[in-house]
Amino acid sequence: MKRALVVSCIIVLGAIVGGCGKKGSESATAASGASASEAPVQPVQGASDAAAASGAQKAGPLGAVTKKALPAEAADTLRLIKAGGPYPYGEDGVLFRNSALMLPEHPRGYYRAYTVRTPGATDRGQRRIVCGGARKQIKDCYYTEDYYASFKRISE
């Protein structure tokens, strides 16, 4: 009796563990029509249309925006990044993983995210600047006004 119970438990556990593998999650995402990494890609195309209407230039898969065309608060954030702080929020300067691969691929730790203040917001808002490379460097930076759903490369 004990042996039958142990064998039954092993079979059940095997089925549970086997169902948690990669193929199980792929079939679940296939049923929904897209994987989690694909979902944010669609807003980028619509955002580039909106970017073109706002004076931003298109550059490859990402839109582009000049520093002059950024909101004044974004220019302030760029100055803080170049100076190395102090930043208004403790979360500023933390690692940005780029897990959705919306930005050009680089090794982990390359990108850092910074808050762009939003007038009238009671929290950090949705606007961010993400910069790659060494700290205090603003040559490889991107602006998002929709909390990482789309990006515009910041150009001179």
Image: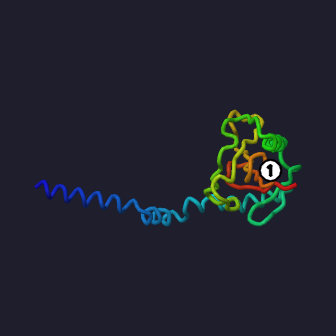
* Picture quarter with the C terminus: bottom right
Crowding at dot 1, Cα within 10 Å, few <14 / some 14-19 / many 20+, comes out as some
Number of numbered callouts drawn = 1
Give the x, y percent position of residue 25: 45, 62
Give the secondary structure at mark 1: loop
Give the x, y percent position of residue 3: 14, 57
* Picture quarter with the N terminus: bottom left
Looking at the image, the residue that sits furthest to the front is 134
Q: Residue at x 65, y 58 (%)?
A: 107
Q: Nearer the viewer, residue 3 or 82?
A: 82
Which of the 4 image quarters holds residue 7? bottom left
**Side of 145 where 31 appears, left or right:** left
Q: Tell me: residue 5, above or below residue 113.
A: below
**Side of 28 where 67 appears, left or right:** right
Which of the 4 image quarters holds residue 24? bottom left
Give the x, y percent position of residue 137: 79, 49
Q: Nearer the viewer, residue 76 or 107?
A: 107
Q: Residue at x 63, y 53 (%)?
A: 97
Q: What's the residue type where badge 1 is placed?
A: Ile
Q: Nearer the viewer, residue 135 or 42?
A: 135
Which of the 4 image quarters holds residue 40? bottom right
Q: Residue at x 74, y 57 (%)?
A: 47
Looking at the image, the residue that sits furthest to the left is 1
Q: Residue at x 58, y 60 (%)?
A: 37
Q: Nearer the viewer, residue 66 or 130?
A: 130
Q: Tell me: residue 72, above or below residue 1.
A: above
Give the x, y percent position of residue 59: 80, 64
What's the coloring here? rainbow
Residue at mark 1: 138
